Amino acid sequence: MTRTPRLHIPHPPARPGDTPDFSYVDISPAGAVPRPDVTTRLRDIERSLAFEMVRVLDEEHAAVGPWDPHLDHHDLQVGLRYMLLTRLFDERMHRMQRQGKISFYMKSLGEEAVSVAAAQALEPGDMLFPSYRNQGLHFARGRNPVDLMCQLLSNTRDMCKGRQMPVMYHWVRGNIFSISGNLTTQYPQAVGWAMASAIKGEEDIAAAWIGEGSSAEADFHHAMTFASVYMAPVVLNIVNNQWAISTFQGFAGGERRPFAARGPGYGIPGVRVDGNDFLAVYAVTRWAAERARQGAGPTLIEHVTYRADAHSTSDDPSRYRPRDEWKAWPLGDPLERLKAYMIREHAWSEAQHEALAAELGAQLDESWEEACGFGTMTDGPTLDRNELFEDVFKDVLPHLIRQRDQFRDLED
């Protein structure tokens, strides 16, 4: 009998007009996954952590199980504040783009816990290597929204001096590395930084974030190899939000096994976590950071979440997935889940939430007005064109000096 090999083409479970179908998402009961000691051998934990899903918040908004980090009311309120600030900032900047006041934007709707909870779990000296949907890292480390707005406007206070696409932020003082439009470059950069920190005998670790689609890039595998071989103190995050632009996560290999399961193949623990559960993300990140600081090496974390909005302002998700798919996502809204838990714990109220939303809305109004004072896309002041020749090389090369002089002569 002749057999003909068949090529498998991944297909999303639902297309525009279909009923949303998330039956492919394996969800463990809240509190069901054991929390091993950070020094436990990989062979003893690789199956339970990489294939199950760490969850703390149950359907009744109670914190259950061994991964409950037992955060106090103040820490919970800080986390909720920065998640809400991130969401309101996204809404405001998206609206500004639609009004033609900025050229491009990328929202993190539905993914706020991935950034804010992780930032709270890490130490201020830890170096962060984000992707382009991690604006919550900046807010959780105390950044002024004006700084991010100025970068979006490419004005005279733009941290990138007009040389980067909007949302490609960086922050030296906050230990947040520059975002790159080239996918996955931050993974080997984070591993290298972590290796250097270990060589110098420092306690600080590195953490990096990529989307699940980026895990198909070669840089992912290079970074995993170096991290494993040299036991780099680094936390490597894969944000599995189900879609890489218009491509379903199955094209990156998500149909076969969880992305977290790639870790054990390199000798690295992989942990699959509910990315919409603030407490679970905090607890898993803290666990991975403790492993790194104790010399146990890297951890790969898969955050199972959902990109609730378009990939960017240049994308129309209604062309490749059901219009209301976000409402059917079984892990819910991270902000609403944390709020419900805090209300249950008498750490918050609806009145406090409304007051906070009003306060943050007013703050963003003032921030936008201040940012526009440094220039907009249509009104000055504008960047000094002579800065084109600065910050390229440590010492300005002779041919650049000649070009700079010629440029100034033209202006005169």
Image (spheres, rainbow, N blue to C red):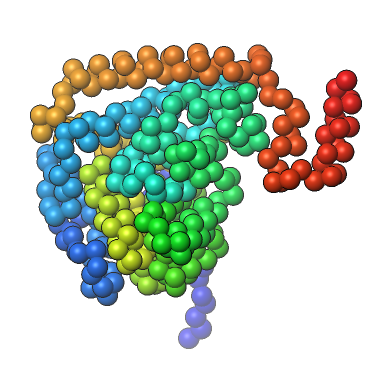
**In the rendered image, is residue 211 in sight?**
no
Q: What residue is drawn where x is 40% and y is 68%?
A: 231
Residue 320 as seen in the image, left or right of residue 31: right
Report the quarter where the C terminus lies: top right
Work out whether residue 276 or residue 36 is closer to the camera in this orientation and state it.
36
| Count of picture labels | 0
Q: What residue is drawn where x is 68% and y is 24%?
A: 383
Q: What residue is drawn where x is 31% and y is 16%?
A: 359
**In the rendered image, is residue 398 in sight?**
yes
Compared to residue 177, the image places residue 290 above or below, namely below
Query: Which of the 4 quarters of the picture holds residue 355?
Result: top left
Q: What residue is drawn where x is 47% and y is 69%?
A: 225
Residue 254 as seen in the image, left or right of residue 28: right
Residue 131 as seen in the image, left or right of residue 158: left
Q: Position of residue 364 (x, y in %)?
A: 42, 19
Q: Position of residue 208 (x, y in %)?
A: 44, 52
Q: Position of residue 26 (x, y in %)?
A: 26, 56
Q: Position of residue 258 (x, y in %)?
A: 35, 61
Compared to residue 25, the image places residue 75 above or below, namely above
